[in-house]
Amino acid sequence: MTTDATMLRINQGVQLHHQQGRREAARDLFAQLWDEIGGERGDPLHVCVLAHSMADVQDDVHQELVWDQRALAAAELLTDARTAEAGVTLPVAGLYPSLHLNLADCYRKLGDLGRAREHLQLAQARIGALGDDEYGRLIKGGLDRLTQQLG
């Protein structure tokens, strides 16, 4: 369980979106947090998780892609020590399947099936970092669905 104040606020936005269906309220909270953390210059953990969450509340797939790209770039700056310090139990390697899944889905929506398949393969190559828990099953299910869609 995280005690990091920014991570807790990001989680509030995730709850607004996924639990309450308040997509615009989540987007507004995420935008406020983005400014507070200093945007892409902020703590890579906050940038990664916030951008990953912000991508999910975009109405335009091009904007979703930009946020997903920011999340991936920030993940590359993360360490397991930093995530553990924030109380995040998932190792950094466990973030990549979801990050690549989201990028693959964006590229699919944009009709760039080559890039979609590339990111799908990157996600599948890192699936071993996920546990057999609810999160792991969610991501694995998303990869299976996208694999079907890309045929």
Image (cartoon, rainbow, N blue to C red):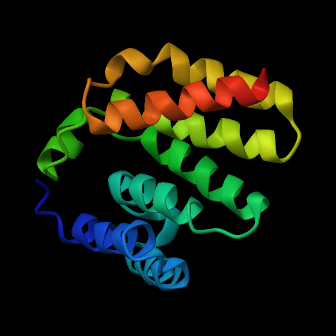
Residue drawn at (22%, 44%) of the image: 83
31 or 131, nearer to the observer: 131
Q: Where is residue 42 in the image (x, y as percent from the top left)?
A: 40, 63
Is 99 above or below relative to 20? Answer: above
Q: Is residue 108 above or below residue 141?
A: below
- Of 56 and 115, nearer the camera is 56
Say above or below: 15 vs 28: above
Residue 141 relative to residue 16: left or right:
right
Residue 134 locus on image (x, y percent): 28, 37
Left or right of residue 52: residue 8: left
Residue drawn at 19 percent across, 46 percent down? 88
Residue at 35% in and 60% down: 46
Seen at 11% across and 53% down, the residue is 1
Is 101 displayed left or right of 20 in the figure?
right
Q: Residue 2 falls in which quadrant of the image?
A: bottom left
Q: In this view, does 24 lie above or below 116?
A: below
- Whole-percent x and y of residue 124? 53, 18
- Does residue 102 appear left or right of residue 39 in this picture? right
Give the total number of marks visible in the rendering: 0
Quadrant (top left, top right, bottom left, bottom right) of the C terminus: top right
The spot of residue 31 in percent (x, y) is 51, 79
